[in-house]
Amino acid sequence: MAARESGGMAAARCAGRIGVMASVAVNLALLAMYIRRRYFGGGRSDKDIVPSKGKPPVTSESVVNLDHGDPTLYEEFWHGTGDRATIVIPGWQTMSYFSDLGGFCWFVEPGFEREVRRLHRLVGNAVVDGYYFLAGTGSTQLFQAALYALSPAEDGTPMSVVSPAPYYSSYPSVTNFLNSALYRWDGDANMFNGDTCIELVCSPNNPDGGIRKAVIKSNSGKTIHDFAYNWPQYTPITEAASHDIMLFTVSKCTGHAGTRLGWALVKDMEVAQKMIKFMELNTIGVSKDSQLRAAKILKAVCDGYELSPASEANRLFHFAQRKMAERWSKLRATVAASGIFSLPNEVSDYCTFAKEKVTANPPFAWLRCHKDGLDDLEAFLRGNKIITRGGPKFGVDEKVVRVSMLDTDEAFNMFIGRIASLK
């Protein structure tokens, strides 16, 4: 009798344990299903996986954020290209770390390199023959790789890094971020008194759109040319540049900032190899998926000029140049009527790409305020629901701000309306 009761109790305990374990298993399965569906889209069709827009729609009550150069202006063009710029990547493709073991850079996709060189030959803004080609996760990574490759100075001391003010606001923070013993930010190139340095030449310049050349005259000085905006929608193309290190980015060329891809043209093999080593240690190469997408996008750009009928619907640079010209015309008229703001003078030159004289349309407006008693323009505009980037971040005074000209039509028109109301 006691044995039967003991056996029954044991069975009950066992059944209880099984029940608890089953309950835990069900709960874990439900939790896994929720996580998969919530964060990875599991269990849904591809049509249900909708990419984020990145920004909320603009309304009359919105704060217009023109602090970043987010190139959403280009969405209109790419909506009209259809399958010409669309790529499908099968699940089995691009799985290896390696792209082309026979090439100079092991993580560069040959198709991406081929389309970049084709694009430069089409536009005529840079020499590609005789240059080593590198890909990077945006031009910022390539900038860091170039600093690594060019440092330290011959005596082992940190290399001074300079750029003429107003300089791109990220140059100081990116240079000093790791507190490296190889290099350090040393400010305005026009104020530099040393002999050995790395000069950053951004042309057209971010933030003011000026055409820049190196200002440091030294045999031991080195230069990095940042050509993110050296495209015909922003500036007249006057020559095919042939500097030692030239940096470009998909972001400001085609508007695909989210693809996070840039490239460098490097003349010296040893410098190029050091840059590759930096990216190898930093991110073990560059996304092959991004390179394949960028190759398809750049192919669509080149095909639009070389193979398609001559229409703006096929020609990216003509579309973007028209949009930028329209925006600059509106802004200049608004600023002229305000009585308190000013902009740099217009600059025109003969463009070898357009084969005519064209006016520059910089990607940023360098807006200055002359209102008595107003010393902080960034704060003044923020109080009127306009976010910009103030002059001190670019090495100059507080009465000037940088305004992105690359946002959506809705955001830009809201900005124009608010600027027009300020007196």
Image (tube, rainbow, N blue to C red):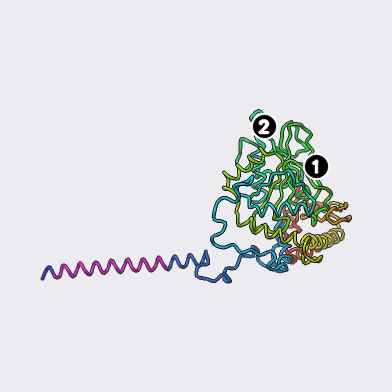
Residue drawn at 65 percent across, 43 percent down: 144
Q: Quadrant of the C terminus?
A: bottom right
197 on left or right of 281: right
Mark 1 and 2 residues: CB-CB less than 8 Å, in contact? no
Q: Quadrant of residue 212?
A: top right
Residue drawn at 67 percent across, 39 percent down: 269
Which residue position holds label 2?
153
Q: Quadrant of the N terminus?
A: bottom left
In the image, is residue 337 above or below residue 15? Answer: above
The secondary element bearing badge 2 is classed as: loop
Q: Main secondary structure of the magenta part?
A: helix
Q: Position of residue 38 (x, y in %)?
A: 51, 66
> Which of these two is toward me, 395 or 228?
228
- The amino acid marked with disc number 2 is Ala
The secondary element bearing badge 1 is classed as: loop
Q: Position of residue 244 (x, y in %)?
A: 73, 40
Give the residue furthest to the left.
Answer: 1
> Which of these two is toward me, 195 or 98?
98
Q: Position of residue 193 (x, y in %)?
A: 75, 32
The stretch of residues the image draws in magenta is 4-29
Q: Position of residue 354 (x, y in %)?
A: 85, 57
In the image, is residue 199 above or below residue 255? Answer: above
Which residue position holds label 1?
213
In the image, is residue 121 above or below residue 192? Answer: below
Residue drawn at 81 percent across, 56 percent down: 361
